[in-house]
Amino acid sequence: MKFNIQPHLETEKVDLYPLKEEDFEEVYAAAADPKVWEQHPSKDRWKKDVFKVFFDGAIQSKGAFRVVDKFTGKIVGSTRFYDYNPSENSIFIGYTFYSVDCWGKGINPVVKAAMLNYIFQYVEKVYFQIGADNVRSQIAIGRIGAEKVGEEEVSYFGESSSLNYIYEISKEKWEVYCSSAKK
């Protein structure tokens, strides 16, 4: 099935625009705080040269987004779709980060909902790779109904491998979650 893994997605709080090379400085500004990366597998991504490798991987993925806060007009993070598997009818969402100043403001759930609502038109399962030490992201993904289904060593683009937990949510579970959230 053919579908676009880098559409423009819009919510009441944020716009997700396809990531472009010229976005580097603004995206890096959101990523430059060491706190952003303290629970991620690569804790030094706040350094510009290390982040550049991460950013280059995002561009090459052709599924990455810059997340723009509609109220401030600022880029507050990035996320992406990747590793579409047609035989399993699944895809991954990940490589997500947000600037510290938008933590706790409901950005992540809105972004994930926009991405899941879009992608579940085309796939039956979505996976998330989350660093074993990234408790904040593990809790966040559990809140939307994803469940831990495994552990594996993952090599992020241009980085050494690290232990990640694999979470899964099916289209059916997402629909149930959305129905119960509306009540």
Image (spheres, rainbow, N blue to C red):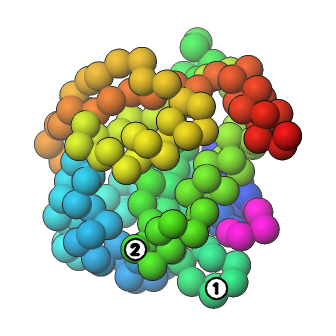
Q: Amino acid at mark 1?
A: Gly
Which of the 4 image quadrants contains residue 132? Answer: top left
> How far across and how far down the image is residue 68, in percent?
61, 74
Residue lying farthest top?
A: 87
Residue shown at 60% from the left, 63% from the top = 106
Which residue does the numbered mark 2 point to in the structure image? 100
Q: Which mark is residue 94?
A: none
The image position of residue 128, as x and y in percent, is 46, 35
**Quadrant occupied by the N terminus:** top right
Marks 1/2: CA distance? 16 Å
The answer to whether one can see residue 29 in this image is yes
Relative to 24, is 76 on the left or the right?
A: right
Which numbered circle lies on residue 73? 1
> Which of the two residues, 22 or 101, is positioned nearer the viewer here?
101
Q: Is residue 89 left or right of residue 35?
A: right
Chief secondary structure of the magenta span? loop
* Image height of 147 relative to 135, above or below: above
Instruction: Say if 18 sits above or below 68 in the image.
Output: above
Q: What's under tag 2, amino acid-wise?
A: Val
Question: Element at badge 2?
Answer: helix
The mark nearer the N terminus, 1 or 2, is 1
Magenta highlight range: 10-14
Query: Residue 52 at what x, y percent from top left?
Result: 28, 68
